Amino acid sequence: MTVKATDRLLDQWDTKKASSMTEPEKLLYRSNLLGSDKRITNYGGGNTSAKVMELDPLTGEQVEVLWVKGSGGDVGSIKMDGFATLYMDKLRALKGIYKGVEMEDEMVGLLPHCTFNLNPRAASIDTPLHAYVPRKHVDHMHPDAIIAIAAARNSKELTEQIFGKEIGWLPWKRPGYELGLWLEKYCLENPEAKGVVLESHGLFTWDDDAQACYKLTLEIIQKAMDWFDAQTKGIPAFGGPVHSSLDAKARQAVAARLMPAIRGMISGHQHMVGHFDDSDAVLDFVNAKNMPPLAALGTSCPDHFLRTKIRPLVLAFDPALQNIEAVMAGLPDQIAAYRDDYAAYYDRCKNPTSPALRDPNAVVYLVPGVGMLTFAKDKATARISGEFYINAINVMRGASAVSEYCGLPEQEAFDIEYWLLEEAKLQRMPKPKALAGRVALVTGAAGGIGSSTAARYLQEGACVMLADIDAEALARTHADLSARFGADVLRKVQMNVTDEAAVQAAFAQTAVEFGGVDILVSNAGIASSAPIEDTSLALWNKNMDILSTGYFLVSREAFKLMRAQGIGGSIVFVASKNGLAASPNASAYCTAKAAEIHLARCLALEGAEAGIRVNVVNPDAVLRGSKIWSGEWLDQRASTYKTDKDGLEEMYRQRSMLKRSVFPEDIAEAAYFFASDLSAKSTGNIINVDAGNKEAFTR
């Protein structure tokens, strides 16, 4: 659901639709509705539950079962299999085992023993918080308006001022078994209360009816939002602005300079992917007088903190001076200082059982007048980290306007970041795919070879910028690949490879969208066929412009970006068998392809010292899905070889040594090999993917 910040929360509950639902289905319905509005809870944040009577498969008797959002899920997109199910009698029996906070983490290991009906979904650390609230339905949300109260210096007083006795308050306590007992005690001692604000954390609300619980959650959050609107009207946010934003084009230009440099400096352990945000909420914060001290305090809610680290790095950019060169020169020292500060934080707070120091680089980078840059192992995480920091900005805006904002205490922050349970969760993460964190730009991406190569890279975890001159075909390819691999990892740009400005703009856009480029697949092409006497100067120049000059222009921009990153890269030219073996009636095409191959050799020499590898894939007779085989070229080649369209592919197959057809997916496999670490020691090489053609043997 798309909403403006000033819109009221919408009650989307459809009574008729819900009337035929089971209680677990109502829980799912409620969860998805709550998660559809990021003012109610952030991505992956919060959880919901319902206590339901179920038929025990062992005894055939009715038993009480807790349905609760499982570990790592998101309430907005959760499905039925995203809920853990546990016997309530066994959860209550855990109280007899619990010996105090010193064994709190051990209780998590006992939750699987409470599993109902062999449900494989792992229960989250928040399970006791839901289990011990003596109500059937419980919502735990992370609304910015509530966390702004929870993160204020006088949080308890503000909670009572806004909600009276309707909503209670509990002091900060790390989520876990002990906090579950605290919640139970509060509920039993305050039976009329409808919920609780947890200091520096979020909101709990409860009821014995699913719809009533949903409505109550909306009502309490809206009440907090209305209170803040009234209290902060006319108060400049964050002490008022001291910087003015650059215009949108200039902001993008600054981001395009900064992001590849930062990405290169922080990609020592693994390639990182970037995200840029210059929304109004971000610009209000980065331009404000109180941004530096507020940013230094760090975030408050544990979910915010886990996604954004102890604090952001504020870059020394002055939009009035537009001192980008000075900022670029100072970046290494700023990033090194952040690492040193993070290592010192680790040393101050660690204990004998703490996991080893993790990546000490910042996740969030704030740039006055420009916006926010975030970096993570993949695009979705980089984007979500930015969304979490916007949640933190909203919290700081509210808390600092009505009170004093308080970040999470340093030791508490460390204990969550390096919590052994969090470490165990990280260790369970699947192994990264071969191209995880890599960014590829593919020219001619709307054709058969280009789209197949893009799909192969996406399959291996890369982010891809699709570039093509054909806007309609590009849009279709983008839509198809987005449906298969998700929108986060894919972008498109209409680009003519012979237009220098368009090529430069496409690489700058890629830097802003993903942080840089690791892989260039230069694949854009045409084909022409004509006897030399019939080859016009225009036809000759068109071949040279696209197949030689176009390859030069995109390679030059890729070199600039890869050198700025300083982490190497791979350039793959999709040339042709015709670049090595002459063909009749195709002098312009063959000559341009030969120039393309020799350009690759030259670039391999130049790029080696920077770790930039340049290799060539030579296809032959890839008819299926290829745009160059449509129209005149197909007719011309059929005429040259005295056959028709239907017979041409069979002719090429029989001409090959292996008697096999060559498909776009075959070329994509070779392009993947050259892009991946499988070929880390290969540069200046050629792979022929032509089913065997002795005239094209390279030696």
Image (tube, rainbow, N blue to C red):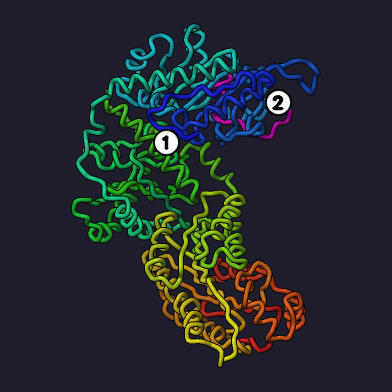
Q: Along the horizontal axis of the image, is 454 left or right of 81? A: left
**Residue 495, image x and y in percent?**
46, 65
Q: Which residue is located at x 39 percent, y 39 percent?
A: 389
Mark 1 sits on what residue? 304
Q: Amino acid at mark 1?
A: His
Mark 2 sits on what residue? 116
Query: Which element carries disc 1, helix, strand or loop?
Result: helix
Neighbourhood count class around disc 2 (C-alpha, 10 Å): few under 14, some 14–19, many 20 upward: many
Q: Nearer the viewer, residue 597 or 134?
A: 597
Q: Quadrant of residue 426?
A: top right
Q: Nearer the viewer, residue 698 or 424?
A: 698
- Give the magenta-colored segment's residue range: 117-131
Neighbourhood count class around disc 1 (C-alpha, 10 Å): few under 14, some 14–19, many 20 upward: many
Q: Is residue 594 above or below residue 343?
A: below
Q: In the rendered structure, which disc, 2 or 1, sits on the residue that comes first in sequence?
A: 2
Q: Which residue is located at x 30 percent, y 23 percent?
A: 153
Residue that sits furthest to the bottom in the current view? 533
Q: Which residue is located at x 44 percent, y 39 percent?
A: 306
Tell whether label 1 touches label 2 (CB within 8 Å): no
